Every structure is written in C-alpha cells, then in structure tokens.
Amino acid sequence: MYSYISGQIVNVENNLATIDVSGIGYEIACSANTIVKLPTQGKACKLFTYLYVREDEMSLYGFATREEKAMFLKLITISGIGPKAAIGILSGMKPEALAVAIVTGDIKTIAKIKGVGKKTAERVVLELREKLATQETDYFTGEVTVNVTGMDNLSQEAITALKSLGCTQAEAVSMVSAVRNECDTLEELILKALRRMDK
C-alpha cells in the first residue's frame, strides 16, 4: 500500500522511527542498519516501506534502501519468519552480506545473528536458494537477448545473489560480466559487482 514515506524525523527510539508527513506521525519499525542511516531530528527523511496487516495488528516497516526492502520481502515468504524476525535478521547482517551468505550456503554466519539459530539459518538458505533458482533466465537490453544459462555456474550464482538485492536481471548480468575475469570465488565476484554498482 505504501511504497515509501517521506517527511521529517520526529523521534528515533530503539528500532522505531517516527516521521511527520503533513502533520501525521508515522511510527515505522526499522532494522539496526537502517536506524544508523537516519538523519537527526527535524531533518528530511525517506524510507521505503511495507505495511503488515493482520486482524489484530497493523504495522509499518521501513528500509533505507530498496535492496534491504527486497531482502525483507524475500525473508517473510519463509515459513516461520514474520516481519519482526526478518527485521532482526537484517539488523544482524547487511542485505548484500546476507545475500552472499545465502548463495554460498554459509549457514554458520547466518546462524550467528541474534535470535536466528542453525535451523532457521538452514531454512533461509534452502528456501531462498530454491526460489531464486526458479527466476527467469532471460532478459532484454535493447534488441539483444542474453541467456544466463549460457554463463558459467559461478556467474549464475552471483547474478542470483544480485537479483535478491533488488537488481534487475539486466543490471546483474552486466555487472557480473564486467568483473568475472577478475574473480576466482563467488564472494569476490559478488562484492566486486556490488562495488561496480556503487560507482
């Protein structure tokens, strides 16, 4: 319902940020990674948002970046992980680091996040890797069609991770292709691709 909310920061307490929009104060739950990026009181702020609605609850969740929101939306598709748990996971790891851990099957690192544990970490890796693997493998840039299945396994896994962060298929393929020859490991390939995106 709400794609984003833009207004002035009124208050930040624990994991809750209050934003004033034309006299209406929106209380928004955020991850620790988003909270530290928020400006000081009275400054303009924009958060990408998700409205969680149940019979006994209506809550707003906010994210500093589209990538964090995209990862949040993937996490809450997993059985047993609700919005609060997803926010907890994103408080423990930045979305790009989490994506690398998921794609590389690094269960130990995910399990170190407070409140997660080994079983939940295993479920996150298993379910998100499966879902990402079913995404489309073709994209169009101009009049050229690129088939991801024609790329090596390392490149395909890196593209999957970048897409989980909100990149389009075209962006992911372009970034991975540009740095593939410089990298020997999946983690290195993903991180170099992300740095290229930030330039």
Image (cartoon, rainbow, N blue to C red):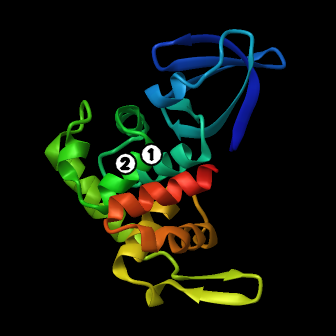
Residue 134 x %, y %: 42, 76
Q: Which residue is mark 1?
A: 95
Q: Quadrant of the N terminus?
A: top right
Crowdedness of circle 1 by 10 Å Cα count: few (<14), some, many (20+)? many
**Mark 1 near mark 2, Cβ–Cβ under 8 Å?**
yes
Q: Is residue 76 something that shows in the picture?
A: no
Q: Relative to 1, does residue 133 appear above or below in the rendering?
A: below
Image side of residue 10 versus residue 69, left or right: right
Q: Nearest the camera: 16 or 80?
A: 16
Residue at 15%, 45% in the rendered image: 118
The residue singled out by tag 2 in the image is 98
Query: What residue sits 44% from the left and 85% below the top?
Result: 151
Task: State the mark number for residue 152.
Answer: none
The relative height of residue 65 versus residue 136 in the rendered view (above or below) is above
In the image shown, does 147 or 69 lie closer to the viewer? 147
Report the residue at 69% width, 44% height from top.
Answer: 3
Element type at mark 1: helix
Residue 75 horizontal/vertical position (percent): 40, 50
Closer to the camera, 192 or 50?
192
Percent position of residue 26, x then y: 67, 21
Residue drawn at (23%, 54%) of the image: 106
Mark 1 and mark 2: span between their CA atoms? 5 Å
Q: Quadrant of residue 158?
A: bottom left
Q: Position of residue 189 (x, y in %)?
A: 41, 63
